[in-house]
Each structure stands twice: as C-alpha cells, then as structure tokens.
Amino acid sequence: MSSSMLTAAVFALQAALEPAPPLDPPAPTPQVEILPLRTDPVVLDQLAGGPAKGAWGVSVQAGYPWFSLRALLGVGHRLAPLLEVESALGRRFSFSAGLSLAWVDRPHVRLSGEVLLGWMLQEAELSKRGPSGELRLRLAFPVRWAVPYLVLGTRHALLPSRTQIIREAGTETQWSARHEWTPWGSVGLGIRISQRIGLDVAADYGWVDAPASVAIPGVHLGIHFGGGR
C-alpha cells in the first residue's frame, strides 16, 4: 500500500471516529395570539343598533305619548333581525319586524340603519289600519358609562278605506287608499349600569300624519337588558 493511500485511510478513519456536529435546534413554533371578542354593553347595542353575532337584547321604553318594546338578536357581522311593538296613548299600535345593520362601528361611534315592515292599527274616533314601513338611522357616541344617541326615522302607512253608497238599484262599494307620513326623532342619553343592564332617558318628537296634523313632543324612560356572546 502506498504512503498516499495509507494517509487517505488514516484521515477517513479519523473522520469516522469524530463525533457528529450537533443538529440545529428546531425553529420555535409561532405563537398565535387569540384576542378576546369585543363585548359591547347591551345599552349600546339596543340604542345604536347592529349588535355583534350572538348578542341579544330587549328594551322597554315608556313615557308620553309613546311606549315601545324592542328585541334584537345578532346573527352576522353587525346584522340583526328585530321585532318591535309601539303604542301611542294606548290607542295607536304598530307591530313591525325588520333588520338592523351597523355601517360604522368604532370604539366611540356607531352608525346603523334599520328597515322595518309591519301593520298599523288605530282605534279611536277615527279608525285606521293598514300596512306600514319605516326607515331609521341610529347614531351613538359611547364614552365609558354614557351613551349619547340620536335616532331619526321616517314612517309610512297605506290606509285603505271602504265607502258604501246605497242606491235604489243596490249598494255600491268603493275602495280607496290614503298615504300617512310620520317623521320622528329622539335625542337622549343611555346609561350603562353593567354589560347586561342599562337605562336611557330621551326627548321624542313625532309628527303623526304630517303635515296635516300637529306634532306632539314627548319624553320616555327606558330599560335595556340582554346577554349572549
């Protein structure tokens, strides 16, 4: 065996006997931070509309001349179906169902729109009844425990009427329909007692059958409760 071959064999043996270099430590597993879901107080969801998915709330607002019962349930990205019953002096009633959607949702401002369809019934000296619809805007500026808010709405009702004309030849029935417009607004202050309970007090200005009638201002006190998420 030549000296060069012997030298190569010695180097190969030394390389085989040397310990293997340590392996690189595995790369650390990236940690994904799971942020908690934002939970809004129920008084904000009820007054400003557009609660988050899974949140629900019920509101009772009573005063002069209006009384209302309102319920919402968040089902999507700030989208919520709602049910509402409203009464004026126990003589005029509106039963409505609709959708509430938050267009702007920031920590200190929320703007939402609502559309409702339903039925209006008035039992008084002049009886009225017919289908109704409403478009509504809600704007709120929550700051700690306070929720100043503004609501603007335009309500429309289609009121059919029947007239019977008695003639010698018989009775003739004629049908007609009249449009009734009711613009209204509320400005008030919501008070957060806890995440699940809140109050509000507001001034209301509703003009039933505008502009043929006289607007009647009013006030109300409300309580809101709910949960979810």
Image (cartoon, grey):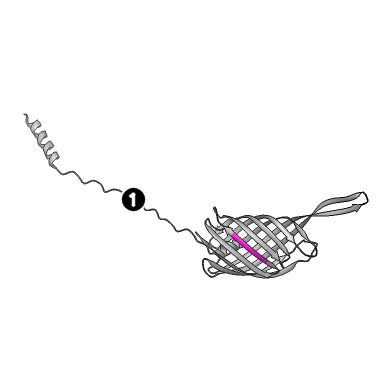
Give the image location of residue 33, x and y in percent.
40, 55
Which is the main secondary structure of the residues drawn in magenta? Answer: strand
Residue located beneath label 1 in the image: 29
Residue in the foreground of this view, choosing between 86 and 213: 86
Q: How many marks?
A: 1
Residue sitting farthest toward the right: 168
Give the image location of residue 178, x and y in percent.
79, 55
Q: Amino acid at mark 1?
A: Thr
Q: Report if residue 140 is visible in the image.
A: no
Give the image location of residue 206, x and y in percent.
72, 65
Q: Which residues are magenta?
A: 67-71
Query: Residue at 86% of width from left, 54% of height from top?
Result: 164
Toward which corner of the image does residue 119 lie, by quadrant?
Answer: bottom right
Query: Residue at 69% of width from left, 67% of height from top?
Result: 66
Whether the magenta-drawn stretch holds residue 69 is answered as: yes
Quarter of the figure that contains the N terminus: top left
Query: Residue at 64% of width from left, 60% of height from top?
Result: 84
Q: Is the residue 214 above or below the residue 118 in the image? A: below
Q: Is residue 225 left or right of residue 209?
A: left
Query: Residue at 78% of width from left, 65% of height from top?
Result: 124
Residue in the foreground of this view, choosing between 84 and 183: 84
Residue density around tag 1, few if under 14, some if 14–19, many if 20 or more, within 10 Å: few
Toward which corner of the image does residue 50 lie, by quadrant?
Answer: bottom right
Residue in the foreground of this view, choosing between 124 and 68: 124
Q: Is residue 124 left or right of residue 99?
A: right
Whether the magenta-drawn stretch holds residue 162 is answered as: no
Give the image location of residue 41, x and y in percent.
53, 64
Report helix, strand or loop for mark 1.
loop
Q: Report if residue 154 is visible in the image.
A: yes
